């Protein structure tokens, strides 16, 4: 595995390959990240991974300084996985003192995580656009756990005419159903057990929606009533719920009775740890 630390290094490496697949990460790699790598390897034999904790996507009071950094262990995992190259930029390499910020459309970021994390998706879009211009990947893999992020990136690729195929990758879960996340390491044993209620709630909502659809009982307020009921269940289980909502997959707008491709999205805190999860369904 080649270690690339400058933009020039990446461009020299890229010039040697007709096509490449790219996996951007913030490190502290787990099986979820490695599933992205595996999917990238299915698309191309030349896979480049980046590790960069992006300061632009952290808001005031968020965990930038404490975000887990495990570079040596990460490199071992990537070598074992057969990754071709690893890009390790610094903020000084990527950003000027007054960086140029990309503004995604408000229709995609004003709600959900964008509402609670102002500036977050601007930071995500900016760093991903820079990586795309530096790496010039043929393919780029992003996990579905960060569902809103995936939609923002897909929109940016279309709007800015990047010649890149975005490959969405399914959520990787622990045996008991918890969506894998770097932030799971913050959970105590008690909180981890408590967190299992998230995926269980999503699956229960999916089952209920499928039942309503089968019986042709979905009406205008069906989804709102289900959201209220299941939010109360999570709150009773000790969660601070940022949102639990049923949306149209492509637009992330609130689901209507006639929508067929849905996603149930949740963001909630257990203790001090904010967790994301979602489940898609087609009715």
Image: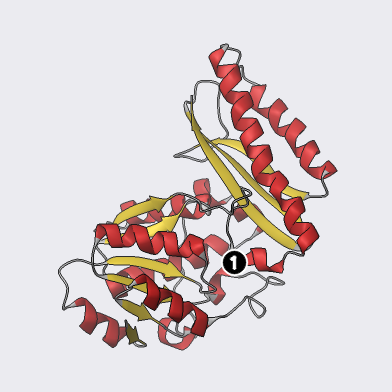
Left or right position of 135 against 180? left
| SS for callout 1 | helix
Image coordinates for residue 65, horizontal then vertical, percent:
65, 80
Left or right position of 159 against 65? left
Image coordinates for residue 106, horizontal then vertical, percent:
52, 50
Between 218 and 168, the one lying in front of the other is 168
Image coordinates for residue 1, horizontal then vertical, percent:
32, 81
Between 267 and 78, the one lying in front of the other is 78
Which residue: 28% across, 87% down? 9
Between 38 and 214, the one lying in front of the other is 38
Which residue: 24% across, 62% down? 44
Is 276 situated above or below 223?
below
Residue 159 seen in render: no
Is 95 situated above or below 41?
below
Total tally of numbered discs in the picture: 1
Can you identify the residue that label 1 sits on? 182
Which residue: 59% across, 54% down? 174
Neighbour class for label 1 at 10 Å: few (<14), some, many (≥20)? some
Is 152 situated above or below 28?
above
Residue 151 seen in render: yes
Which residue: 49% across, 81% down? 98
Left or right position of 95 against 42? right
Between 72 and 212, the one lying in front of the other is 72
Image coordinates for residue 22, horizontal then vertical, percent:
33, 67
Left or right position of 53 against 16? right
Quarter residue 86 falls in:
bottom left
Display coloring: secondary structure
């Amino acid at each position: 595995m080649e270690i690339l630390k400058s933009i020039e290094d990446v461009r020299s490496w890229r010039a040697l390959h007709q096509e490449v697949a790219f996996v951007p990460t913030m490190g502290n790699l787990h099986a979820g990240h490695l599933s992205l790598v595996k999917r990238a390897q299915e698309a191309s034999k030349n896979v480049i991974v980046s590790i960069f904790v992006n300061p632009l996507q952290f808001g005031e009071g968020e965990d930038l300084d404490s975000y887990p950094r495990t570079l040596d262990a990460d490199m071992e995992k990537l070598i074992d996985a057969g990754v071709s190259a690893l890009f390790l930029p610094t903020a000084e390499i990527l950003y000027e003192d007054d960086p140029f910020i990309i503004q995604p459309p408000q229709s995609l970021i004003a709600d959900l995580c964008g509402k609670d994390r102002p500036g977050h998706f601007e930071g995500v879009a900016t760093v991903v656009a820079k990586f795309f211009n530096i790496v010039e990947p043929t393919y780029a893999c992003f996990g579905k756990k960060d569902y809103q992020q995936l939609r923002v990136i897909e929109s940016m690729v279309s709007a800015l005419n990047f010649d890149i195929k975005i490959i969405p990758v399914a959520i990787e879960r622990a045996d008991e159903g918890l969506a894998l996340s770097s932030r799971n390491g913050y959970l105590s044993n008690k909180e981890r057990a408590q967190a299992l209620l998230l995926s269980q709630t999503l699956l229960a909502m999916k089952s209920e929606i499928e039942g309503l659809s089968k019986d042709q009982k979905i009406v205008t307020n069906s989804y709102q009533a289900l959201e209220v009921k299941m939010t109360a269940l999570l709150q009773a289980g000790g969660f601070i719920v940022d949102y639990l909502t049923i949306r149209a997959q492509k637009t992330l707008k609130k689901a209507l009775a006639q929508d067929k491709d849905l996603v149930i999205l949740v963001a909630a805190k257990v203790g001090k740890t904010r967790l994301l999860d979602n489940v898609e369904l087609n009715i």
